[in-house]
Image (cartoon, grey):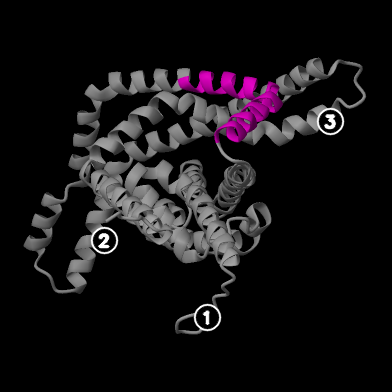
Amino acid sequence: MQFKITQEMKQKIIVYSASLIIAILFFTILNRFKDIKRAIQFIMTILFPFLLGIGIAFILNNPEKWVENKLLKNVPLQKNHKRILATLIVFVLAIGFLILFFSIIIPNTVDSVRQFSTNIAAYSDTLIGYTKDFAYRMNISEKQVEQMLINFDITKKITSIVTESIPKIASYSYSFVKGFINLILAFVSAFYILLDRETLVKGIKKLNYSLFDKNFANYLTLWTNDAKTVFEQYIVGNIIDSFIVGVLCYMVILFLKIPYTNMIALIVGVTNVIPVFGPFLGAIPVIIILCLIDPLSALIFAIVIFIIQQIDGNIIKPIVLGDKLGMSGFWILFSVTVGGALFGVVGMFLGVPIFALIYAGIHDYITVRLKHKKITVNDKAGTID
């Protein structure tokens, strides 16, 4: 008796085999997750300057195009020479702006940190006074309060932290030098990317269409264009938005004469790049610091930062970023949480655009499959015939 494999049996074998392979891969990833994560982090460390270079190229791409096509439009130069000149102009302006910005921000911020460290003992005494006054009002024993203050000696804890940090100065110096070298490599790679962007794009397209069939290659090309748009808008938009928020915060708290203006504005501006949790990561430590100095200043700052975040969320961010991510608030919260848990602050920042692209890819695939099957899914509960 001859055993015949029908087309239906072939389809079932393929489906079951694929499901088994996916299940094995899934459990393998779960069992070796730490090793896989460590390998990814190692690869990312090696590729970091080049990835940073791609990010810098993303940021400077549109300004370089404007200089080349508008500012140098009537300059009698060959196309490649005009490209080199436009790229040099943009890089000189960008580096000059960074030097000017950090030459103003860093010294003032360092002075604020040094002043705060010098006055920490006085702030500790202020906290002790507030605590004793609170204990008196709540009829708590003075001995219990004193013991609690001895156990929670702020000055001693900060001194201990500083002392423990001294042996790490060499390691910090090495990290600084390494970061500076990576920054130079990133700028050099960004410079070459901008010079040869058409050649690079053409090479990637050739590789794409040589590896995959036409339909899937077209899908990847469209998805890559979406990725370029999302990352350009998200990264550049977030940097601009955070800069505006930091400057706005600086002007308001300077007018209100809140202490440590430079340090506070820098903290608020930098942490604002992180979606959802950024405002809290910046505001909470600042409020705690101000509570040690002057509780009224802490209250004023809390009100100011609440108003600024409302203006940012409802006016500045929609204008600067738009609504290109196409995700609900739940998925944004999910991507920030998962990205932060896996890769820290960088994961919190990049988790949103990466998940937005994954979300868009899955959404487009589902839409195409449902259209192919001629199925329309409505909001009502129940099965579909």
Whichever of callouts 3 and 2 sits on the residue coming sooner in the sequence is 3
Q: Is residue 8 left or right of residue 52?
A: left
Is-magenta flag for residue 26?
A: no
Mark 3 — residue? 69
Give the SS element for disc 3: helix
Three-letter amino acid code at disc 2?
A: Tyr
- Which residue is pictured at 46% across the width and 55% down the height? 279
Mark 2 — residue? 130
Can the viewer see residue 239 in this picture? yes
Q: Which mark is residue 379?
A: 1
Q: Which mark is residue 68?
A: none
Q: Is residue 92 left or right of residue 270?
A: right
Q: Tell me the CA gap for discs 2 and 1.
A: 57 Å
The x and y percentages for residue 114 are: 38, 34
173 and 151: which is toward the camera: 173
Q: Residues within 10 Å of mark 2 (few under 14, many from 20)?
A: some
Question: Which of the two marks, 3 or 2, is nearer to us in this view?
Answer: 3
In contact (CB < 8 Å): disc 1 and disc 3: no
Read off the magenta span: 182-211
- Which residue is pictured at 18% across the width and 67% down the height? 135
Three-letter amino acid code at disc 3?
A: Asn
Q: Residues within 10 Å of mark 1 (few under 14, many from 20)?
A: few
178 and 332: which is toward the camera: 332
Question: Which of the two marks, 1 or 3, is nearer to us in this view?
Answer: 1
Give the SS element for disc 2: helix
Query: Predominant secondary structure in magenta?
Result: helix
Can the viewer see residue 280 in this picture? no
Is-magenta flag for residue 203?
A: yes
Q: Residues within 10 Å of mark 3 (few under 14, many from 20)?
A: some
